[in-house]
Image (cartoon, rainbow, N blue to C red):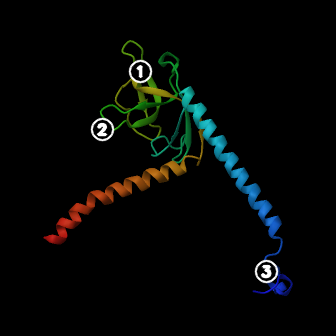
Amino acid sequence: MQPLENLDIEFFNAFPNTPARSRKSGRIATGLIALLALVAVAAAVCKLAGVQLRAVLTGSMEPDLPVGSLLVIVPVAPEKIGIGDDVAYYLAGAAEKTVVTHRVVGIDTARRMLATKGVANTSTDPPVPYEDVTGVVRLRIPWLGMPALWAVLLHTNAQNESNQAPKKALASHA
């Protein structure tokens, strides 16, 4: 074992300004932790207020709501919804609770139904009952929904591959 005074000086020169780098890394880590905490608090407040954050997954509302945008959807009394509002609603008859965001093009107050249509679509959707509406889009932030879009795509690809695996196994044994 060498005494400290005999250690090669070159070893210490290989790591210049290490304390400064450490302080900078510490500030970055603290900033990231603070940002994550802020996002968690904002998400909790949104959840308590009934506000939804949803990503645009398809092009039916382009160019107004581009794919990958993050939407802030606020609950609204159906009577306050107007023609031209972009509403989020549960798709009737879907196996899972699928949420669609389309524009209101007509209102039937007697039947308590909305007529909706995707901006890029040529035809209107089936009528939407008031009780299926989850809220109205109040804010869109382009690109911020991309991580959610990627997660959906990865999940869909994983499901497709797992559904194909038994068929591939059967085909290889035939």
Residue 147 location in percent, x, y?
53, 51
Residues at circles 2 and 3 in contact by the CB criterion of under 8 Å: no
Q: Secondary structure at mark 2?
A: loop
Amino acid at pointer 1: Tyr
Residue corresponding to mark 2: 95
Bin the neighbour count of mark 3 within 10 Å (Cα to Cα): few under 14, some 14-19, many 20 and up.
few
Q: Nearer the viewer, residue 121 or 173?
A: 173
Residue corresponding to mark 3: 14
Residue placed furthest toward the left: 174
User: Taking 121 as reference, is 1 left or right?
Assistant: right
Instruction: Report, in whole angstroms, how far the alpha carbon at label 2 lies from the one at label 3.
Output: 61 Å
User: Taking 59 as reference, is 144 left or right?
Assistant: right
Residue 50 location in percent, x, y?
53, 27
Q: Is residue 167 visible?
A: yes
Which of the marked residues, 2 or 3, is nearer the chain's N terminus?
A: 3
Q: Residue at x 84, y 87 (%)?
A: 6
